[in-house]
Amino acid sequence: MLSQVIPAATEMVLENILTIGLASSIFLFFCIFTRIVSASGSDEVPQKLSKRSEPLPRWEILSVLNYFVVGIFLTSFCFVVFNFKSISGSDENSENSLFPVLIIWCVCMAYFFGFFGISYLDKNAIVHSPSSFGLSQLDAKLSIERSKKINPERNLCSHRFADEPPSSETKRLSDEDVRSMSNEDLAESVRNGSIKDHQLETKLGDYDRAVAVRRLVFENKLDLSLEKIPHENYDYGKVYGANCETVCGYIPIPMGIVGPLVINNQEVFVPMATTEGCLVASTNRGCKAIAQGGGCRAVVLKDGITRAPCLRMPDAIGACSVKVWVESEENRGKIKRAFESTTSFGKLNSVSGTVAGRNIYLRFVCFAGDAMGMNMVSKGCLAVVDMLREIFPEIELIAISGNMCTDKKPAAINWIEGRGKSVVCEARIPAHFVETTLKTNVHTLVETNIQKNFIGSAMAGSLGGFNAHASNIVTAIFLATGQDPAQNVESSMCMTIMEEVEGDLLVSVNMPCIEVGTIGGGTSLPAQAACLDIIGCKGASKRPLETGDNAKKLAMVVAGAVMAGELSLMAALASNQLVKAHMQHNRKKN
């Protein structure tokens, strides 16, 4: 067999000697050209990195493969050129058919276009390939970044603008150096990254100066003066680490005081921070009408902040098993001990489970004393989840808040089950004072309430919105007393009921989820604490009061003020005086 193949191959080579020679010449010229180009660009090759954590590509193998493919392509091309007549004149079954050559060309072209990112020169020339432009610089930067020690506990509140590149040579400054610098130099150091924005208070040891420096930084970034945003004469030490980050000043909000609001036989004055004209005056009129009727009575029906973590089991049956275990009376003590191990004041009222597929949502209800209690209940939930992992090793915590709490969102479960303080407040106002103070009559007021707050709200598909403007009063008191303004969403859920009883007006508000506290959060800020002092519920309850009485009082005052606002606005609507009143009192006069 070998004796036949060798003569045949020799004959084929002799017949195509011209083709092979031309192809070899072109191929040799190509190799010389690539070497010349590679040598000319070698000066720009970046220096080798000292160490590589990953292996380098095998450039020699790629180079040989490149030359081999180019050689095949040139040989086949020259073959077609010198044998074109015989190929084009052959029939379909001829051995000299053009079809095999086309297959070779397709494979070669696929290689050329598919692997164009692989340099056709050598391992140094890869840097200068058009498709690898800039890769060497990127590789060098990545290597430098790998060599740096990265702090795993980055401050999530630190901030850097997207258009501000990190400094390549960050100079570390001691606290003494920082304190000796001028504010302008400090601002420049923040801009170039020598000092982190969030470290100003720590390094300077001066909260007011940190705010002043930060204002310079932002004025430069924004190309805008912040002089109209006040920043002096404020205790930023109360804010730092508790209420706000990247502090640049504060926003003054006008604050009015309404009252006295007579509630549970006590006169209370209520601070309200708002920018809405007529709101304070209108609520004050409602307080007057309530006082003329002998005052209002309020009671807290429920007191429990909620948190509902989302847990997952491998299957739905497993989720049901968790629900049964958690709601079993014999396990209640274990859950309660685990929950209350994290807090001195918090008490677990109840826990219930809701299954959705293999997810289970455990809704914990916690008495939080005078605190609003979100952090308190969250810590307790985590302790219970840790305990459940010992009993159900396969259980997985998806989120500490599974949205069945429900926090800062309207939800039917809050409207039905309550959240925070569930308050009912009621007053009876004689018809005479309805006419003289509210400027309407009982029958008209009751009818307007039905048509607007009941039927109108129902037609709108309202959820907990069967009232005129409860959120107005709730938000104004929240801002004044340091509550979380976002919790106005559920705290403003209210049903206002008005009835005619023996000719008098019987009015009540039902508010199932007023979320307030007198300690923690914004209640520690000086102005907000002073507003709580006006109401008479600042700080933690002290003897002879019971734990949580201050927070309950605040919740009842909120409900009483809401009822006063409802009375006044509904009276204005019933007498068609609303627009006239706003035009008269809510417009600046030139």
Image: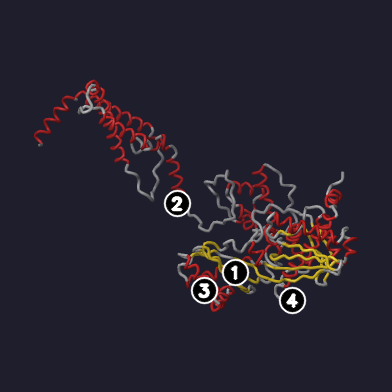
Question: Which residue appears at 70% of the width and 61% of the height?
Answer: 493
In the rendered structure, the answer to whether residue 412 lies left or right of residue 77 reads: right
Mark sitting earlier along the chain (1/2): 2
Lower position in the chain sequence, tag 4 or tag 3: 3
Residue 342 location (% of width, % of height): 58, 72
Quadrant of the rendered image containing residue 36: top left
Q: Can residue 281 be seen at all in this image of the molecule?
A: no
Q: Nearer the viewer, mark 4 or mark 1?
A: 1
Query: Which residue is denoted by mark 2 in the rendering?
Result: 147
Q: Which residue is mark 1?
A: 364
User: Identity of the amino acid at label 2?
Assistant: Ser
Number of other residues with Cα within 10 Å of mark 4, as a class: few under 14, some 14 to 19, many 20 or more: few
Query: Toward the viewer: 562 or 121?
Result: 562
Q: Is residue 171 left or right of residue 508?
A: left
Pair 3/2: label in front: 3
- Above or below — where is 363 with respect to 545? above
| Residue 377 percent coordinates (x, y) | 61, 68
Earlier in the chain: of badge 3 and badge 2, it is: 2
Residue highlighted by disc 4: 545
- How far apart marks 1 and 2 lie (CA) works out to 47 Å
Name the mark nearer the viewer: 4 or 3. 3
> What separation in Å lies between label 3 and label 1 (alpha carbons)?
15 Å
Q: Are marks 4 and 3 in contact (CB under 8 Å)?
A: no
Q: Amino acid at mark 1?
A: Phe
Give the Cα separation between the discs numbered 4 and 2: 61 Å
Front-lying residue, 475 or 522: 475
Q: Decide: marks 4, 2 in contact (CB < 8 A)?
A: no
The residue closer to the viewer here, 438 or 165, is 438
